[in-house]
Image: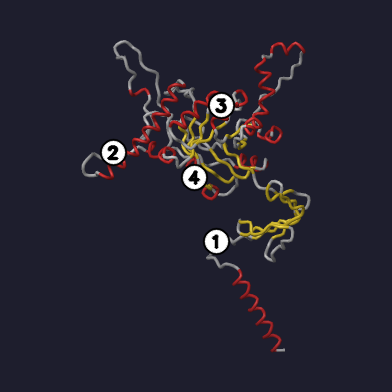
Amino acid sequence: MATDFLNRIFVFFFLSTLTLSAVELLPPGNRPVPLGVHALVGGKIFLKPGEMIEAGTIVIRDGLIEAVGKDVQAPADARIWEMNGLTIYAGFIDSYLKLGGKSGGDSLTTTKPDLTAGKFYGVVEAGNDRGNPGPGSDVARIAPERRAARTFSPDAKALRAMRELGFTSANIISEKGIFRGTTAFVALSDADPNRALIRPDVFQHVVLDAEGGKENAYPESLMGVIAAIRQTFFDAQHYSQDARNFQKHPTERRRPDFNPALEALLPASNGKMRVLFEPTSALMVDRATRLAKELKLTFCLVSSGQEWRRPDLAKAANAPFILRLDFPEVSKMPEEDDWNDISLDQLRAWDWAPENAAILRQQNLEIALTTDGLADKKNFRKNL
């Protein structure tokens, strides 16, 4: 009887020791470590375009895919998830996404030139565009030092809506200015922003935008915008050369001024970071291409949706395009005579806009799709 009791005590302590050694011991106050092994069993799995497993298993361990296959066995420590009747495929990437959150936009302090007699002397006062507060460019709409990664604080509802469409990651952008700063590549998960941020600086974003916003910020003409872009890149090149010269002769000359805007532009200026140019029309594709090639930049383009008007200019760009699927809606035409009010150009737009992606591919151009421009992102798959 005593021997049986001692054996039970031994078995109890032995099992207890196994349990303690198998679980990470944490100090008081810490949450228990969640199970990190999952097996998705029985689903139709698309490994890559043209390669599919009808009923396979995916093993995920600590957030990484450990094994995929038809004959893969679920580990003993895995949670089993039945996927019968479901399809598993890689998540989509939106390469041009506006997520909102903190705006990170322009800080404009622009005023109209004062033309009152006795105060105007033939030149606009320097105070009409004070630029950004603190060090940086003298023009408020030029802020290459801005980083989308710094203002990444997305709304959980917006993330959920993107995931429902099949998007699991995205390249997020800022929404104001000519030089809008660097984009950021993020996971569209509910994880902490520090963990969701995959790559903080992807593209330098430049927009050929002549509207200037509500504050009438300089430059307000397309010629001025192009001149400002060109001059800013030239300034960055000079800034780099000046810094190298000072390193060689630190005791023989004055230290150059530090400029965070030009400092941030150096990777793009040196061809080490791709520039995302955003023209606003089919003709502006040619202007952006000429500008990029003149400055020897590595670049890609955001489609205006009108490349079908001048496919030759798109082909000459020989650069990847990020393509929107916001096609113009065909009017209901309640009355038969309503067709008389529709212009030929509008008819052409209705006809050709959905073929824009096919036209770019016919030019052997690489394209990526985005949900940007859609009033209702649920229309993405329908338009696709």
Q: Earlier in the sequence, mark 4 or mark 1?
A: 1
Mark pair 1, 3: CA separation? 60 Å
Mark pair 3, 2: CA separation? 41 Å
Task: Categorize mark 4 by other alpha carbons within 10 Å: few (<14), some (14-19), many (20+).
Answer: some
Q: Earlier in the sequence, mark 3 or mark 2?
A: 2
Pointer 3 residue: 313
Pointer 2 residue: 256
Q: Please indicate whether residue 142 sits to the left or right of residue 101 in the image.
A: left
Q: Residue at x 54, y 61 (%)?
A: 29
Q: Is residue 20 above or below residue 254?
A: below
- Amino acid found under the numbered disc labelled 4: Pro
**Local secondary structure at mark 2:** loop
In the rendered image, residue 320, in percent from the top left (x then y), is placed at 56, 36
Q: Please indicate whether residue 371 sits to the left or right of residue 265 in the image.
A: right
In the rendered image, residue 236, in percent from the top left (x then y), is placed at 37, 35
**Local secondary structure at mark 3:** helix
In the rendered image, residue 120, in percent from the top left (x then y), is placed at 31, 14
Marks 1,2: beta carbons within 8 A: no
Pointer 1 residue: 30
Camera-nearest label, 1 or 2: 2
Marks 4,1: beta carbons within 8 A: no
Q: Residue at x 71, y 86 (%)?
A: 4
Q: Quadrant of the C terminus?
A: top right
**Local secondary structure at mark 1:** loop
- Amino acid found under the numbered disc labelled 3: Leu
Q: Earlier in the sequence, mark 4 or mark 3?
A: 4
Q: Is residue 239 above or below residue 42?
A: above
Pointer 4 residue: 200
Q: Is residue 271 above or below residue 127?
A: below
